[in-house]
Image (cartoon, grey):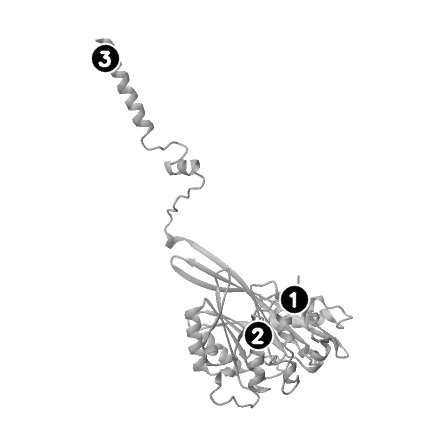
Amino acid sequence: MIRGIMKGSFILLFLCFLLVACSTGTSENGSGDEKIAASHPGKSIENKQPKETMEIKQEISIAAIGDMLIHNSVYNDAKVDGGFDFKPMLERVKPFLSDTTISVANQETMIGGEALGLSSYPTFNSPTEVGDALKWAGVNVVSLANNHTLDRGEEAIQRAIEHWESIDMMYTGAYKDTQDQDNLRVYETKEGVSVAFLSYTYGTNGIPVPEGKDYLVNLIDQELIATAIGEAKDKADVVVLSLHFGNEYERMPNQAQKDLVQFVADQGVDVVLGHHPHVLQPIEWVTGEAGNKTLVAYSLGNFLSGQDEFYRQIGGMLKFSITKTLSGGETTIDVHTPEFLPTYVRYVNWRNFEVIPMYQLTNQELPNAVQHYEEIKAHMSQWMPELTFIED
């Protein structure tokens, strides 16, 4: 009898042991889920953190340069057997243009090509190889709305666009037809930040836009610009607006420029890139009516041209970063860290044109190079003391 009781007690204790061992699977070393993950490395455990509390940041950088104003002295210097080669002129700035997510240039002259007949001031037509050099140097987007867009008529525009498309270059501000104009230019980056590019000019040197062909060039019209900005804000994370405006050769923006910039800032534009004065004008932040901050370069000067007055030989590259943050179900965009690279167009006897970062200039290349560089830095940062300058 005692043996039966002892046997029954042993069986009862054994069953209790099994129940404890097979229960929760937890221990001082972690949860059951963690044990599963440890024993099955390929199995992922669902993140219990609510999606609305997660924060994701994505960042890109954009570079912008001023006027590609191709005088005959420039394209004659680029002449080689079988065509033109502008790459040596951009070789010293290529490392900076190719070191950003997106680089945008103001193509001041239509690249209608040699077959149409090349020409210089006052009615320009440039070799298509200008576009090839920009692509080679790292440029991804070109602005085409300026006072020289209609210099050689519709044929030059159509030929230029044909070439831009052949090298897969995004263009904005001049278009081949109405459908092309209606196609908002949005650059989708692999980082997940989308950028819309808009471009407008104050006029076309008195050359009338052909009737029914407004698509050939975007003219500044506040109502049209406001509508385009609204569409761009709906379809892209960031809106970059190129404006061809201001007075030629004036180193400070006029009131009309400042008024238009305030208007577009009020519409929510993130960045304004100014062109036309052919000299550098300062950079600043402009506050829109909703409290938003707009980064403004009133004029980026000449990047490559055949002009021979000192300040017209100086241009530059504006670089800035954009951070897109997704947090709590909301998306915020921050344009920040503006930097500037002053550049100088050097040539000797109208030969050997090259664009040189000013910080690299020697006294042999430009007498009193350091003093000139410091003066340009002070000029560009007078409204933005925190502006930094690229020197490596």
Q: Quadrant of residue 159?
A: bottom right
Packing grade of label 3 (10 A; few <14, some 14-19, many >=20) is few
Is any atom of residue 299 visible in this view?
Answer: no
Dot 3 and dot 1 residues touching (CB under 8 Å): no
Residue marked by disc 2? 164
Q: Position of residue 123 (x, y in %)?
A: 63, 87
- Give the residue type that dot 1 points to: Lys
Identify the residue shown where x is 35% and y is 32%: 25
Of residue 81 and residue 133, the one placed in the foreground of this image is 81
Packing grade of label 1 (10 A; few <14, some 14-19, many >=20) is some
- Between the residue at mark 2 and the residue at mark 3, the CA separation in whole angstroms equals 96 Å
Of residue 255 and residue 268, the one placed in the foreground of this image is 268
Of residue 78 and residue 56, the one placed in the foreground of this image is 78
Q: Position of residue 46 (x, y in %)?
A: 38, 46
- Which badge, 1 or 2, is on the more N-terminal residue? 1
Dot 2 and dot 3 residues touching (CB under 8 Å): no
- Which badge, 2 or 3, is on the more N-terminal residue? 3
Q: Tell us which disc is closer to us: 1 or 2.
A: 2
Where disc 1 sits, the SS reads helix
As drawn, the residue found furthest toward the left would be 1
Residue marked by disc 3? 5
Q: Quadrant of residue 162?
A: bottom right
Where disc 3 sits, the SS reads helix
- Give the residue type that dot 2 points to: Trp
Dot 1 and dot 2 residues touching (CB under 8 Å): no
Of residue 85 and residue 209, the one placed in the foreground of this image is 85
In this rendering, position of residue 203 left or right of residue 266: right
Is any atom of residue 21 visible in this view?
Answer: yes
Residue marked by disc 1? 94
Where disc 2 sits, the SS reads helix
